[in-house]
Amino acid sequence: MKKHILILACFYFVYGIKAQEKIMVNAINRESTSLNGYWKYIVDPYENGFYNYRYEPFENQENPGNGAFFTNAKRKSKSDLVEYDFDKMDSLKVPGDWNSQKEKLFYYEGTLWYKKSFDYTKKQEDSRVFVYFGASNYETDVYLNGKKLGKHIGGFTPFQFEISKLLKPKGNYIVVKVDNKRKRDAVPTLNTDWWNYGGITREVKLIETSSTFISDYQLYLDDEDTKIITGQIELNGFKKAEQEITINIPELGINEKLKTDHTGKCTIKLKSKNIRYWSPESPKLYDVTISTQEDKISDQIGFRTIKTKGAEILINEKSLFLKGISIHEESPINGGRCNSKEDAKKLLEYAQSLGCNYVRLAHYPHNEYMVRLADKMGILVWEENPVYWTISWDNEETYLNAQNQISEVIRRDKNRASVIIWSMANETPNSDTRNEFLTKLAKFTKEQDPTRLISAALEQHDYNGNPNTRTIDDPFAEIVDVLSFNQYIGWYDGEIEKCQRIKWKITQDKPVIISEFGAGAKYGLHGEKDDRWTEEYQEFLYQETLKMVDGIEQLKGISPWVLVDFKSPRRVLPEIQDNYNRKGLISEKGEKKKAFFVLKEYYETKK
Ligand code: GCB
């Protein structure tokens, strides 16, 4: 136990992630000042602006001097030596990955510095100001006016730093070092099948709050008594216990006053007879306002229950089949990492036109617009931690990193009714260290959010040495609530005809989701159904796979791979792949392949 605390302390020290710097819940609905737009940048593959020539970080030195890029140094006299100048550099758009903005950065993986100058006048003398990043891939060091604010690790989750004391009305400059070098011990690790887009990929904004503000809350239906909305609220910067909090849900006639305890928290128990439950058919969201004397925050929240019973997935106690599709966070409008309401709308409308009531957001947390819109459209969501393939299972820092990433997405999305599953990992090879890692992560996730289901995209195996009978032989299957696995019979594994010979022997009494299956097809390429890369091959694979998986008794959902073709440096076959994984049902230009209609028809008839 002591060892664990020590390692945790080291992790926070090394990574600069301090407990008090958890993001404020529902930052998206706070009044804010955007820092989006054009930022100056310097490409720095040798990290020359970070280390001196003895490879010592400038930021550890009392006087970093003119070499440190975070000081945004300017020549003061003719003889002064300053070997960079942000203001004379080109600009990159924030939010946005650098790879798709500049041709010379298409393959770049390394350090790049951003700089933005701004003025800011606080609205109230005693208020507090935070700089909030939606996400930045992968390691991010942030400096304001030459001082370090902190460091964040992980490419897909939000983070914030308080800047109240450093902020000036005029002439602030924020410098951000972003490094997207892939690393063995990182999460994800060196090896993936998607583009490693670098940069500040989601919005940056300043959020001003009162000195005491509502930093956290979670509201959900009580499992035992669904006439009760329960949960907690927490204040940040509270000076005394017994602060009054009002919670208001006008449509339910709720207007309740609560008092915080000495830790700034309070527990909610609100009774209402006429709650309309959120469901895919009726995605009812309620306006919820939480206020204190100084602060007020509004949200739109749906209330539902989600649980499993034997092999059933029950939403509001009703059994449901998850008609899904997997999605990567790549823009169907301009390519590159996406982060706009328009991208989210297009992707989720594609899914809806396919007949989906569910999406798997692979393989990392997607931007918040996706889950917010899913809430409104009534689409259920699987969210995933980027624990992919061959993580360093025995490295404690890697574990803490994975834990931190899942905790950040839970904090962001725990009030979204659409989100029903937290996925721990994807296609990870079975071993003792991996089982220990994932079991610990699952336990942590349940503690953080006991209201949702846990899963992981596992792999399937021969049953008793018989390759035609498939099973899930994985100790982690005991831990998950929903048993999910990927399978590529007919693509990586044999020819499509093989599907007809396969039998399934799934022994766990749990709902089963096929989290992936698919085949590559180039839109517009036609041929025989056994001719790889043609639309006919993909179409035939979908027909045969759907028949095959219908033989799984516990099957409660599928999320084939994948909605849209996406960029991956692993996929180099000229004239077919050209840097794209072609397993999309839709091309990157929006063209629907034949298999799209096979799946659509299956969903139309599936109960
Ligand atoms: C998988 C992975 C996914 C890949 C896909 C493929 O099993 O989970 O990330 O992109 O296969 O196309 O090979």
Image (spheres, rainbow, N blue to C red):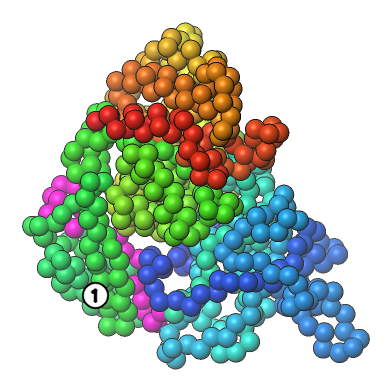
Q: What is the x, y in percent for residue 451?
A: 29, 48
Residue 410 placement: quadrant: bottom left
Dot 1 lies on which element? strand
**The stretch drawn in magenta includes residue 74:** no
In the rendered view, does 217 fall on the left or right side of 489? Answer: left
Q: Quadrant of the C terminus?
A: top left
Q: What is the x, y in percent for residue 65?
A: 80, 78
**Residue sticking out furthest to the right:** 79
**Residue sticking out furthest to the left:** 273
Q: Is residue 24 above or below residue 522?
A: below
Which residue is tagged 1? Answer: 245
Q: Is residue 604 above or below residue 568?
A: above
Viewer-nearest residue: 556 or 497: 497
Residue at 21% across, 71% down: 247
Q: What is the x, y in percent for residue 502?
A: 42, 12
Is residue 39 visible in the rendered structure shown here? yes
Q: Which residues are magenta?
A: 209-229
Viewer-nearest residue: 429 or 177: 177
Q: Is residue 519 above or below residue 394?
A: above
Going by the numbered disc 1, the residue's amino acid type is Ile
Is residue 408 visible in the rendered structure shown here? no
Residue at 44% across, 60% down: 341
In the rendered view, does 109 fall on the left or right side of 93? Answer: right
Classify 10 Å Cα crowding around label 1: few (below 14), some (14-19), many (20 and above).
many
